[in-house]
Image (cartoon, rainbow, N blue to C red):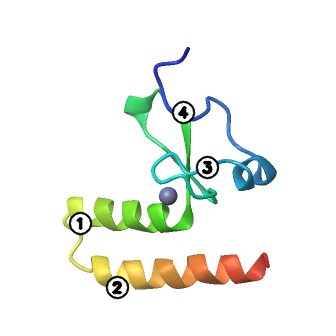
């Protein structure tokens, strides 16, 4: 059993849509990766992906994080609308 979370190889869109978010259990739609997690691909739902992006921007002390998040949320919502 792996000590890492997620999957070593990337997810196809079909796999991702059937895989639960590693954080909250909702169906996932995004993939993250961290070096400390062995470079594994981590499935996240849209809300957790948005939260993580915001967290990282704040951690990086990006002064215009709110502006960037508004732009990113618009992009994510449009992508969701395009696929329905
Ligand atoms: Zn989630």
Q: Is residue 48 above or below residue 74?
A: above
SS label for mark 3:
loop
Q: Residues within 10 Å of mark 4 (few under 14, many from 20)?
A: some
What kind of element bears circle 1? helix
Q: Is 7 located above or below residue 1 in the figure?
A: below
- Label 1 neighbourhood size at 10 Å, few (<14), some (14-19), many (20+)? some
Mark 3 touches mark 2? (CB < 8 Å):
no
Labels 4 & 1 near each other (Cβ < 8 A): no
Q: How many marks?
A: 4
Q: Earlier in the sequence, mark 2 or mark 1?
A: 1
Residue labelled with disc 1:
58
The verdict on label 2 being within 8 Å of ligand 1 is no
Which is more foreground, mark 3 or mark 2?
A: 3
Q: Residue at x 56, y 35 (%)?
A: 6
**Disc 3 designates what residue?**
20
Say whether disc 3 or disc 4 marks the residue closer to the N-terminus. 3
Left or right of 64: which side holds 74?
A: right
How far apart are the alpha carbons under marks 2 and 1?
A: 12 Å
* Above/below status of 42 relative to 27: above
Residue 76, given in percent of the width and then of the height, sits at 58, 76
Side of 44 relative to 29 (left or right): left
In the image, residue 82 lies at what x, y percent? 76, 81
* 27 or 15: nearer the viewer: 27
Instruction: Give the mark nearest the N terminus, 4 or 2.
Output: 4
Q: Which residue is painted at 63% across and 57% down in the image?
A: 27
- Which mark's residue is nearer the viewer, 3 or 4? 3
User: Is residue 82 or residue 47 the one in the foreground?
Assistant: 47
Residue carrying label 2? 67
Per the image, the residue denoted by label 4 is 40
């Amino acid at each position: 059993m792996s000590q890492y979370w997620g999957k070593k190889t990337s997810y196809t869109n079909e796999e991702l849509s059937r895989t639960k978010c590693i954080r909250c259990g909702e169906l996932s739609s995004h993939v993250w990766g961290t070096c400390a997690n062995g470079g594994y691909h981590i499935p996240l739902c849209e809300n957790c992906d948005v939260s993580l992006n915001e967290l990282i921007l704040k951690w990086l002390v990006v002064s215009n994080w709110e502006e960037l998040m508004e732009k990113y949320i618009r992009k994510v919502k449009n992508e969701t609308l395009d696929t329905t």
